[in-house]
Amino acid sequence: MADVLLHDLWFHQVDDVVIEKVLADGELVVVQARTSAERVACPACGTASARVHSRYVRRLADSAVGGRPVAIELQVRRFRCRQHACSQATFVEQVEGLTFRHGRRSAGLQTMLQHLAVMLAGRAGARLIVSPAVV
């Protein structure tokens, strides 16, 4: 039951993500998760691949919970493209609604910061969104 509630809290907008642990480290909440999709499509050619090349942990800043900053440690996989003619030999899986290429924030936090920047602009927006570095 608790796992379902935690999943709904952080990953309600995404599929194929499993929460491993949630740690409260002082003022920081760390969510350790991993992806669970069996096959991932190559972004260059669209061919689905299940050949895992390697794994690594992405650290993403996420929106605060209960006034505490949140960091998501997401274990992602690098896949080999099955098409020999593809220009991209390997690629990293992206979780729709959570990650984007080279992103160090969750997609939700990125969207929120963009809306704040447009609404407040300038120094007022900068003062409002300044928070301790999570990544």
Image (cartoon, rainbow, N blue to C red):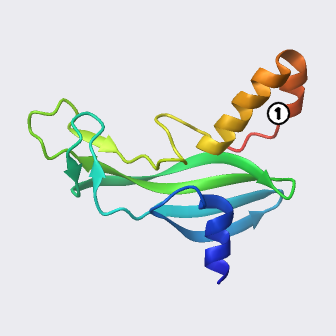
Residue marked by disc 1: 129
Query: What is the three-letter code of the residue carrying label 1?
Result: Ile
In the image, taking residue 93 as reference, residue 67 lies left or right, namely: right
* Residue 67 in picture, x, y percent from top left: 87, 53
* Quarter assignment of residue 76: bottom left
Q: Residues within 10 Å of mark 1 (few under 14, many from 20)?
A: few
Q: Give above or below for 37 relative to 76.
A: below
Q: Quadrant of residue 11?
A: bottom right
User: Could you say where residue 33 lies in the image, as x and y percent from the top left?
Assistant: 54, 63
- With 58 as the anchor, is 106 left or right in this view? right
x then y, percent, for residue 53: 26, 52
| Residue lying at 59% horizontally and 42% vertically, measured from the top left | 107
**Residue at the top extreme, as displayed:** 122
Q: How many marks?
A: 1
Q: Position of residue 7 (x, y in %)?
A: 61, 68
| Rendered position, 103 above or below 59 | above
- The answer to whether residue 116 is above or below residue 5 is above
Residue at image location 74% in from the left, 30% down from the top: 115
The residue shown at (48%, 60%) is: 15
The C terminus appears in which quarter of the rendering?
Answer: top right
| Picture residue at 38% right of the left edge, 48% below the top | 93
Quadrant for the N terminus in the image? bottom right
Identity of the residue furthest to the bottom in this view: 1
Q: Secondary structure at mark 1?
A: helix
